[in-house]
Image (cartoon, rainbow, N blue to C red):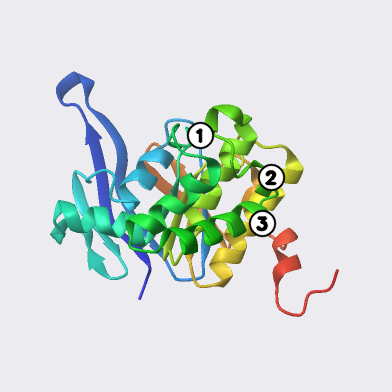
Amino acid sequence: MSALELRGVSKVYGDGPTEVHALRNVDLSVEAGMLVAVMGPSGSGKSTLLTIAGSLEVPTSGEVLVDGVPVANMSRNDRARLRRRSIGYVFQDFNLLAGLTSVENVALPLELDGVTAKKARVAGMHALEELGIGDRASHFPDELSGGERQRVAIARAVVGDRHLLLADEPSGALDSVNAEAVIRLVRAACQRGVAGVIVTHDAQLASWADRVVFLRDGRIVDQTMPPPGPESLLSPGATS
């Protein structure tokens, strides 16, 4: 069973002369443990695909299934619970809460789901340390650089027992060293069984994926397996 499945998904904004077809009859299946990179020019529908996959938007037509369950059949509360428990989402603008410290932002989804504050903070701290910003745990978002806020957002998305990770340009604000730290964390989540979908313009980042999907004008125009890349460093039996 796929962790994420889009069946004939289309999305239309506006009507009449202002009508925009953001997605056109998109089929996409992502298995547990798989990392899929979505590439394409600006305006090709990449971000719309992610927001629909994450149940933040409703498709005009077609069906979205998460863990085999049609999202359209869920109540608003059930969809909110799905996003909180099962889906980690990294937004381009980070969406961090200004009144919470870094570790509080990361721990929040776990606390909302009933995890004790102490356990949630421990898990949040571990995720921050994996991304090299454990020393910024007590800082508020406006005290962080853009790259640090990006890494806090990544940590929040991967913490806990998520089944699906959706990331919109996860390395966009980072230098090459920190971008690699981020993709290693995403790849490690996939090795634990998480299904990952990342939107990226970065071919180096895409080389870590199991499959690369190309969008143009709202349609999937090609899918390919990337050549062996740095992700091989994480494969079983790899040596440094």
The amino acid type, in three-letter code, at marker 1 is Pro
Between disc 1 and disc 2, the foreground one is 2
The amino acid type, in three-letter code, at marker 2 is Asp
Residue named by callout 2? 135
Between disc 3 and disc 1, the foreground one is 3
Residue named by callout 1? 41
Task: Determine whether, in the image, residue 79 is placed left or right of residue 152.
Answer: left
The amino acid type, in three-letter code, at marker 3 is Glu
Indicate the quadrant where residue 219 lies.
top left
Residue named by callout 3? 130
In the rendered image, the quadrant that contains the N terminus is bottom left
Mark 3 falls on what kind of element? Answer: helix
Q: Nearer the viewer, residue 219 or 128?
A: 128
Indicate the quadrant where residue 188 lies.
bottom right
Residue in view at x 33 percent, y 60 percent: 113
Q: Nearer the viewer, residue 213 or 192?
A: 192
Q: Which of 53 and 15 is in front in this view?
A: 53
The Cα atoms of the two marked residues, 2 and 3, are separated by 11 Å
